Amino acid sequence: MQILPVLDLLNGVVVRGVAGRRDTYRPIESRICSSSEPLAIARAFRSHFGLERLYVADLDAILQQRPNLEIYRQLSRDGFSLLVDAGIHNLATAATVLEAGADSIIAGLESIPNPALLQALVAECGPGRVLFSLDLQDGRPLIGDGDWSGMPPLQIAQVAIQQGIERVIVLDLAQVGIAAGISTLDLCAAIRAQNPDLELITGGGIRNRNDLQLLANSRLDGVLIASALHNEQLKRDDLGCG
């Protein structure tokens, strides 16, 4: 199971995400790094845990359409593989993010206005470079100004897969950073039952080794983690338990 450490970027630095309440996000205070600079945090993930594949949630791009392209370049030049959520809402932005060093782009429900754009992204970038993020807030789909309204989460996932998506993240922002445990397992199980070959990742609420083992037993392919790494609730040896 892939362990994907998260870099939440806001105003160009790494912040601590808590329950999706973005107006409360502050620069990270970490036990593994004294800095909130993205490259320093990424290097701490590598030195402490051996992790070089990162999930970058660029809130400057998601909220204000100001992607931190130079940060992507720095991380890529330093040897990191990047999955980047930059609030993709058109093909041009996707191309710009990939050209700046992203290995894959995240097409988030919050930002993608309709299934047609998702299909176009897969056609333009290839299914191996596009992940669909089923963004939730306390179990409810986090839908922006788009055509997804009225669909329950499982239906949204199925519609995304029908557009050619082969990799899905199920992320409940309400669980992020509060160490309350995993809330997405039932939904992930329902998606897996209908799509046995899908690459399926989840995030939000990971606390310890037991949670990782639970995810591995549930046939998840990957997990997004931030707070449990910064707080050293997880050790390097724990990451191979799945």
Image (cartoon, rainbow, N blue to C red):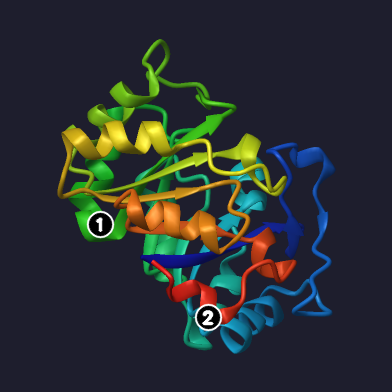
Residue for point 56% across, 80% down: 236
Q: Earlier in the sequence, mark 1 or mark 2?
A: 1
> CA separation, marks 1 and 2?
36 Å
Identify the residue position indicated by label 2 in the image: 237
In the rendered structure, find residue 125 and report the number of the disc placed on it: 1
Residue for point 63% across, 55% down: 207
Q: Nearer the viewer, residue 242 or 168?
A: 242
Q: Secondary structure at mark 1?
A: helix
What amino acid type is highlighted by mark number 2? Asp
| Corner quadrant of residue 58 | bottom right
- Judge the density around disc 1: few (<14), some (14-19), many (≥20) Cα neighbours within 10 Å: some
Residue for point 32% across, 25% down: 154
Q: Secondary structure at mark 2?
A: helix
* Extreme-front residue of the structure: 210
Q: Nearer the viewer, residue 228 or 211?
A: 211
What amino acid type is highlighted by mark number 1? Cys
Residue 59 % position (x, y): 65, 49
Residue 48 vs 224, above or below: the answer is below
Residue 201 % position (x, y): 38, 51
Frontmost of labels 1 and 2 is 2
